[in-house]
C-alpha cells in the first residue's frame, strides 16, 4: 500500500505507474502532478514560505499544530529549512510547473489498482479540479472532497481524514 501527500502523492502516482502490480492500494492526498483543468496550482516560488504555509490552511487557527508548523516568529533555522525545501521543490517541479504532461495517460495503467483521492474542498494550493482529473485518469478511483478544509485534511479535519484512510486500507 502507499499513501502520498502533495508532491509525495505525485511521486507515489508516478511510482505506481511504473509498477502497478507491486501495490495493493493507493491513497493520494491533494497530489500535484496533473495540470488542473480549471484553476491553477499555487505558485510557491512567487511568495515567501510563510505565506505559502498560511495559504495551505483554510483556517490556520483551527489547527493546533499550526503554531509549530508556522510560528509567528520563525527561527533562522526554520526559515533556512523552508528555503531549502523550496529550492529542492524548484529543482524537481519547475518545468513544467508542478505537473507531468504525460501523467494522465500513464495513470490509465492503474485501472486495477484501488485508489482513493482525498481533497480539501477549499484547497488553495492544488484545486479540486486536479482531483477530478486524477479520478478521470484512474478508472474506478474514488474522489472524496472534505468540506471546510484546505490543503491539509490530515491536520484540518483529522478524524474525518483518519476514518476515510482507515476504511480504505482495511
Image: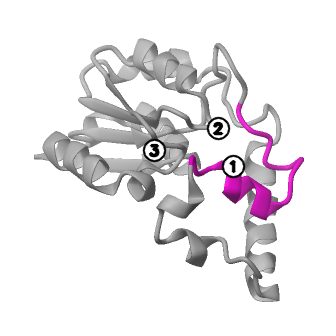
Q: Give the range drawn in magenta.
A: 41-58
Secondary structure category for the residue under label 2: loop
Q: Could you say which quadrant of the image residue 42 lies in? A: top right
Q: Which of 161 and 59 is in front in this view?
A: 59
In screen coordinates, is 78 left or right of 162?
right
Is 95 included in the stretch rendered in magenta?
no
Q: Name the residue under label 1.
A: 55
Residue 145, picture quadrant: top left
**Which element type, helix, strand or loop, lies under badge 3?**
helix
> Is residue 37 found left or right of 10 in the rendered image?
right
Write down the residue under mark 3: 12
Label 1 element class: helix
> Is the C-beta separation of discs 2 and 1 under 8 Å?
yes
Magenta stretch holds residue 48: yes
Residue lying at the far front in this picture: please name it: 61
Residue 124 got which mark?
2
- Which badge, 2 or 1, comes first in the chain's sequence? 1
Q: Which residue lies furthest to the right in this view?
A: 46
Q: In this view, does 54 lie above or below 58?
A: below
Percent across and percent down for residue 23 are: 26, 41
From the top left corner, tell me how far across and down residue 86 is, in percent.
Answer: 78, 60
Amino acid at each position: 500500500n502507499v499513501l502520498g501527500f502533495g508532491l509525495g502523492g505525485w511521486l507515489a502516482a508516478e511510482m505506481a505507474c511504473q509498477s502497478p502490480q507491486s501495490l495493493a492500494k493507493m491513497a493520494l492526498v491533494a497530489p500535484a502532478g496533473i495540470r488542473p483543468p480549471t484553476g491553477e496550482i499555487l505558485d510557491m516560488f512567487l511568495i515567501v514560505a510563510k505565506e505559502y504555509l498560511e495559504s495551505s490552511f483554510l483556517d490556520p487557527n483551527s489547527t493546533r499544530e499550526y503554531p509549530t508548523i508556522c510560528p509567528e516568529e520563525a527561527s533562522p533555522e526554520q526559515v533556512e529549512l523552508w528555503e531549502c525545501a523550496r529550492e529542492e521543490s524548484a529543482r524537481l517541479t519547475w518545468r513544467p510547473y508542478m505537473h507531468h504532461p504525460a501523467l494522465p495517460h500513464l495513470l490509465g495503467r492503474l485501472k486495477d489498482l484501488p485508489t482513493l483521492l482525498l481533497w480539501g474542498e477549499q484547497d488553495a494550493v492544488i484545486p479540486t479540479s486536479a482531483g477530478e482529473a486524477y479520478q478521470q485518469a484512474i478508472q474506478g478511483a474514488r474522489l472524496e472532497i472534505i468540506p471546510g478544509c484546505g490543503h491539509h485534511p490530515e491536520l484540518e479535519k483529522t478524524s474525518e481524514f483518519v476514518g476515510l484512510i482507515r476504511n480504505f486500507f482495511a
